[in-house]
Structures are given as C-alpha cells and as structure tokens.
Image: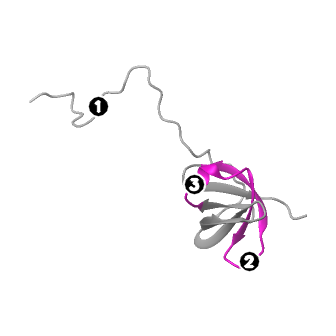
Amino acid sequence: MAQNGGAFGKRPAAKGSAPPKPTRPTDKRQGERTASFKSGQVFIGANKALDCAVRNLSKEGCMISLFGAENLPDDVEISVTLGQPRRKARVTWRDQQDAGLEFLPSE
C-alpha cells in the first residue's frame, strides 16, 4: 500500500495555485441582523416580481435566497412578508442563490 504522508484521500495542492476566493464579502454591516425565514418578493422594474426567502433582517438591510440571485440588477425593490409595502434596496453582494440588500432611504 502506498502512503502519502498521512493525508489519506487528499490530493496534494498544485504548485502556484491560489486559494479559492470567498463569494461573500467580509461582514461590513453596522446593525445586528436577526435570523428569519420569511417569504418575500423582489421587484425588478415595473412588472417583474420574484418570490424569495428572507434569511435575515435588520433595519438597514436583509439577506435573501432565490434561484438566480447572481442575475439580480444593482437596484431592486423588496416586500418582506407578502402584502407589505415595497422598499427600495441596493444589492451589495450576490452569488448563485443568495444576495445581500441594503435598504435605501425613503423619498
């Protein structure tokens, strides 16, 4: 049996390869968020609404989960809990299924 230095099942790292980049930025939020699992809707433009799950929530923003989150535009509107008024928000980060939103001031 061949031994590979006690690292059974592990491949040696390729020389010169960079470590994988995290998809989410370092946490820069100022307020504390509360974990939640509420249903919501993200509005893109005047006529397109996408159902989402609101994973955490604060007065400054929220994290949402939805299929295709990486395709969200920079500016959206969101209604947390169906039937609630829409809030304007800016997407601060996104990956395949999650996105972080910063609520914008009301006009």
Q: Which residue is mark 2?
A: 84
Q: Which residue is mark 1?
A: 11
Q: CA distance from mark 2 to mark 3?
A: 23 Å
Structural crowding at the residue carrying mark 3, measured as other residues with C-alpha within 10 Å and reported as few (<14), some (14–19) or many (≥20): few
Q: Residue at x 21, y 32 (%)?
A: 6
Q: Is residue 98 above or below residue 87?
A: above
Structural crowding at the residue carrying mark 1, measured as other residues with C-alpha within 10 Å and reported as few (<14), some (14–19) or many (≥20): few
Q: Quadrant of the C terminus?
A: bottom right
Q: Quadrant of the N terminus?
A: top left
Q: Earlier in the sequence, mark 2 or mark 3?
A: 3
Task: Identify the amino acid type marked 3.
Answer: Gly
Q: Residue at x 60, y 49 (%)?
A: 70
Q: Is residue 96 above or below residue 40?
A: above
Camera-nearest label, 1 or 3: 3
Q: CA distance from mark 1 to mark 3?
A: 32 Å
State the SS at label 2.
loop
Task: Identify the amino acid type marked 1.
Answer: Arg
